[in-house]
Amino acid sequence: MLAGLFTVWSAWAELTCPYGGPAGREWCRTTVGVGGVFVMAGMGTAVLGAVVLWGGVWRPSDPNGGDGWRWGEAVLIALAGLVLGLQVIDSPVCPDGYRLATGFDLCISGSDAAVRIEATSRLALQLGTAAAGVVLGVLVAWRRFPWPVGVAITIVATALGTIWFVGDTVGLPW
């Protein structure tokens, strides 16, 4: 629920696009659409989270926990691992003093454009992070951790995944 509300708050500036003039209106044509999609998705996520919270408050406590809750945590952790692995970690990277060429895995020197080197790939790190999220989610679902540890992993993974995803798409509100 909090991730959905955070997404709505972050996307609101894109939705209400405060730029004026011809250049601002041209810019706003794109941002308003993206902001609207993220506001709707955030509202849906917030409502879904509220329904889950409401259902959890009124259910009797089961000391072992239900399977649905654990697999829900597993899905959230796996999605966060996918976001962090595939969106946050850049595939090609360049050393200091070089910039990445548009469309190519090639680094161009900032001081001499004739000096070019191949960009370093971080695909293994990306895939490893995504796989670690999936494996960690499955371990939580199979109860390989005590429940407080599973809850803490779920909260941290969901918060990090949401912050980075929203930050890379519509921007953070601060």
Image: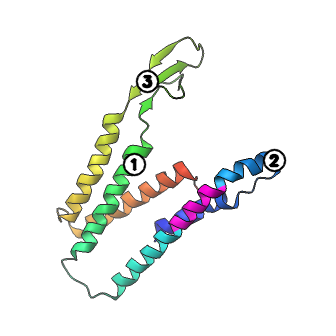
Name the secondary structure under disc 1: helix
User: Mark 2 is on which residue type?
Assistant: Pro
User: Mark 3 is on which residue type?
Assistant: Ala
Name the secondary structure under disc 2: helix
In front of the other: 9 or 155: 9
Q: Which residue is mark 3?
A: 119
Residue 164 appears in view = yes
Picture coordinates of residue 47 (x, y %)?
Answer: 47, 75
Is residue 131 placed above or below 137 in the rendered structure? above
Q: Residue at x 54, y 28 (%)?
A: 102
Q: Residue at x 27, y 48 (%)?
A: 132
In front of the other: 36 or 58: 36
| Sooner in the amino-acid sequence: mark 2 or mark 3 | 2
Density class for disc 2 (Cα within 10 Å; few <14, some 14-19, many ≥20) is few
Picture coordinates of residue 5 (x, y %)?
Answer: 53, 68
Is 23 on the left or on the right of 39, as rendered?
right
In the picture, which quadrant includes the C terminus? Answer: bottom right
For the record, the magenta segment spans 32-42
Colour pattern of the rendering: rainbow
| Sooner in the amino-acid sequence: mark 2 or mark 1 | 2
